[in-house]
Image (spheres, helix red, strand yellow):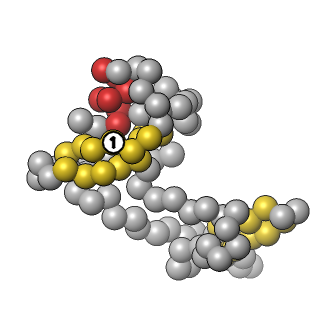
Amino acid sequence: HSCEEIKANWPDSPSDYYIIADSNGHARHVYCYMEALCGSEKGWMRVAYLDMSDPSEKCPDGFRLYEENGVRACGRPSTTSGSCVSTTYPSEGIRYSEVC
């Protein structure tokens, strides 16, 4: 099952950890977010999590830490010519079709 399939078959499923199969049939322990996200009510699998309320949490390589009024966030670096930055998170062989 995927998080989306769990939500579709059991609509009252809470956000929690579930065991789903990866593309090779291996069981993976993943967190499924079952609330609305990005305008969709389907289940979402978390592929990365940064707790920026934790002062020891670092931004991924290439991202800049922004802090304002006690709120910490990661974003693209400041440059005079504009910039774009990306990172890759492993999905442990689990396919996904949308990132939000």
Question: x and y percent of residue 38 in the render?
Answer: 56, 36
Count of numbered tags: 1
The answer to whether 63 appears left or right of 34 in the picture is right
In this view, 50 is above or below 24: below
Residue at 71% from the left image edge and 78% from the top image edge: 79
Residue in the foreground of this view, choosing between 35 and 39: 35
The answer to whether 10 appears left or right of 65 in the picture is left
Q: Looking at the picture, which amino acid does disc 1 mark?
A: Tyr
Find residue 21 and report its image quarter.
top left
Q: As drawn, which residue projects farthest toward the right?
A: 69
In the picture of the structure, the residue carrying the numbered disc 1 is: 18
Find residue 55 and report its image quarter.
bottom right
Residue at 30% from the left image edge and 29% from the top image edge: 5
Query: Can residue 63 be seen from the camera position used here?
Result: no
In this view, 48 is above or below 2: below
Q: As drawn, which residue projects farthest toward the left?
A: 24
Quadrant (top left/top right/bottom left/bottom right) for the N terminus = top left
Question: x and y percent of residue 49 in the render?
Answer: 51, 59
- Crowding at dot 1, Cα within 10 Å, few <14 / some 14-19 / many 20+, comes out as some
Question: x and y percent of residue 48 in the render?
Answer: 46, 59
In this view, 44 is above or below 74: above
Which element type, helix, strand or loop, lies under badge 1? strand
Residue at 40% from the left image edge and 65% from the top image edge: 89
Residue at 46% from the left image edge and 31% from the top image edge: 14
The answer to whether 68 appears left or right of 82 in the picture is right
Query: Can residue 88 be seen from the camera position used here?
Result: yes
